[in-house]
Image (spheres, rainbow, N blue to C red):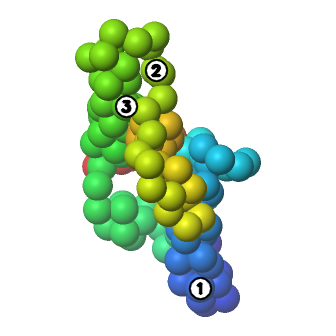
């Protein structure tokens, strides 16, 4: 679809979607939200851009191949389990930093796990969307 209205709307909405997705990611371990829903919102922004500008332009906007995001997401999620493995505590025991950050609240390994899920969801959904739209590079 190659309309001026859709392209203009996409340019306006994509930054809003990305800020919302980051907000959902950051607050997800304390309140509703998290890596999964944040990743879906970010992927929907990329899907909107794909509809507005086409496959090649959306791949240029993404800059990183989806498989790299999938790999990075799995690695980050795994790294969130390392502290519990090293200390001999039950698998995926949460570790927290004593400082609180506005909006995010307490920061610790659950936020790291959410970040891994966020990257993984963006990578998988964009891979699917790009494959459905046409041949991915």
Q: Crowding at label 3, few (<14), some or many (≥20) Cα neighbours within 10 Å?
A: many
Please name the residue that numbered disc 2 is placed on: 92
* Mark 1 residue element: helix
Residue 80 numbered tag: 3
Q: Earlier in the sequence, mark 1 or mark 2?
A: 1
| Residue 89 percent coordinates (x, y) | 40, 12
Question: In the image, is 134 to the left or to the right of 38?
Answer: left
- Residue situated in front as seen by the camera: 135 or 47: 47
Q: Quadrant of the N terminus?
A: bottom right
Which residue: 30% across, 49% down? 65
* Mark 3 residue element: loop
Question: In the image, is 33 to the left or to the right of 15?
Answer: right
| Above or below, comparing residue 68 to residue 92 in the picture | below
Of circles 1 and 3, the one toward us is: 3
| Extreme residue in the right direction | 32
Please name the residue that numbered disc 1 is placed on: 12
Q: How far apart are marks 1 and 2 (CA)?
A: 39 Å
| Above or below, comparing residue 53 to residue 127 in the picture | below
Which residue: 60% across, 76% down? 16
């Amino acid at each position: 679809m190659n309309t001026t209205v859709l392209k203009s709307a996409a340019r306006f909405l994509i930054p809003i979607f990305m800020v919302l997705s980051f907000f959902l990611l950051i607050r997800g371990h304390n309140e509703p939200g998290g890596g999964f829903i944040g990743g879906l919102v970010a992927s929907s922004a990329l899907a909107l851009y794909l509809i507005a500008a086409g496959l090649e332009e959306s791949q240029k906007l993404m800059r990183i191949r989806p498989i790299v995001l999938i790999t990075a997401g799995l690695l980050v999620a795994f790294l969130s389990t390392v502290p519990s493995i090293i200390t001999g505590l039950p698998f995926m025991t949460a570790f927290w930093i004593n400082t609180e950050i506005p909006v995010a609240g307490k920061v610790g390994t659950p936020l790291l796990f959410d970040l891994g899920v966020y990257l993984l969801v963006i990578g998988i959904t964009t891979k699917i969307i790009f494959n459905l739209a046409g041949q991915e590079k």
